Image: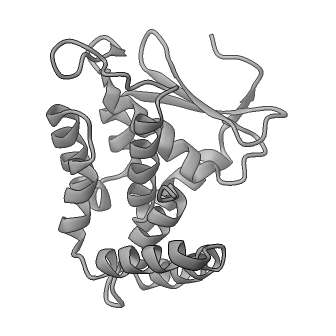
Amino acid sequence: MPIDTEYLGLAYLKGYRSGELPDEAERATRQYERGMAACKGEFKVEMETIFEFIRLQTTEERLSNITELAPDPQIAEEAFQFLKKAPRRPLAAQLRERRITSVNRMGGVEDEASLVPLRRGFSVLVGSRHSNPVLAFAHELAHTFFFDLSNLERRALGEGTLLGYNKDDQSEETWCESFAYLWTSYPRVARGIQRKWDSAKYVSQVC
């Protein structure tokens, strides 16, 4: 059975030691325990082993794990530098770096989100009734690493091909989900996204 990315994300959060981000560690522990309750048999043993390995890692090691999963060296380097600086930077500066220009609520939509390239940057659309808008926003931002920010076009990976990494490719989706969990595990980032979401406008379409 494949590793569920949600459980992996919770493992990242649980990995913060008691001296690091104690509020997040407490919240993450509760989520982790609920996640583990859904695991059974051999899969549960496998997940506990993985979680314990991640728990003992340093923040730097967890960053390295995310970048090692990236499909391209350039994406790996950009993501590593972005995440490494994230705890100390205002959210607005991080969004400008990734050319996120707007965040909007899509009325009447539940667990859906999308990244829309526009003329001057990206718009992030999240369903107005999404169960986790903060994580959904972070996941869509992660997709920007698969674009050339100079022209907002999908970047060529490897030897001039996209290597199948697109919105319909599970490998890209899994990487973006793991990135989102790690990025939002920083309290300043999570709080900033929540404030952004609270003030987001309702739209029926993006143009």
Q: Residue at x 77, y 21 (%)?
A: 204
Residue at image coords 41%, 53%: 178
Q: Quadrant of residue 62?
A: bottom left
Q: Quadrant of the C terminus?
A: top right
**Quadrant in which residue 188 is drawn:** bottom left
Instruction: Judge whether residue 21 can be spotted in this image.
Output: yes
Residue 9, percent from left and from top: 46, 62
Q: Position of residue 142 (x, y in %)?
A: 40, 39
**Residue lying farthest to the front in this orientation:** 42
Number of callouts: 0
Q: Nearer the viewer, residue 157 or 100?
A: 157
Q: Position of residue 158 (x, y in %)?
A: 17, 22
Q: Is residue 22 above or below residue 195?
A: below
Left/right of residue 163 with respect to residue 142 in the rendered view: left
Q: Residue drawn at (52%, 76%), measured in percent from left and top? A: 42
Instruction: Give the colour scheme shown.
Output: one colour
Tell me: residue 22, above or below residue 201: below
Examine the rendered structure and indicate whether residue 85 appears above or below residue 13.
Answer: above
Residue reaching furthest right?
A: 108
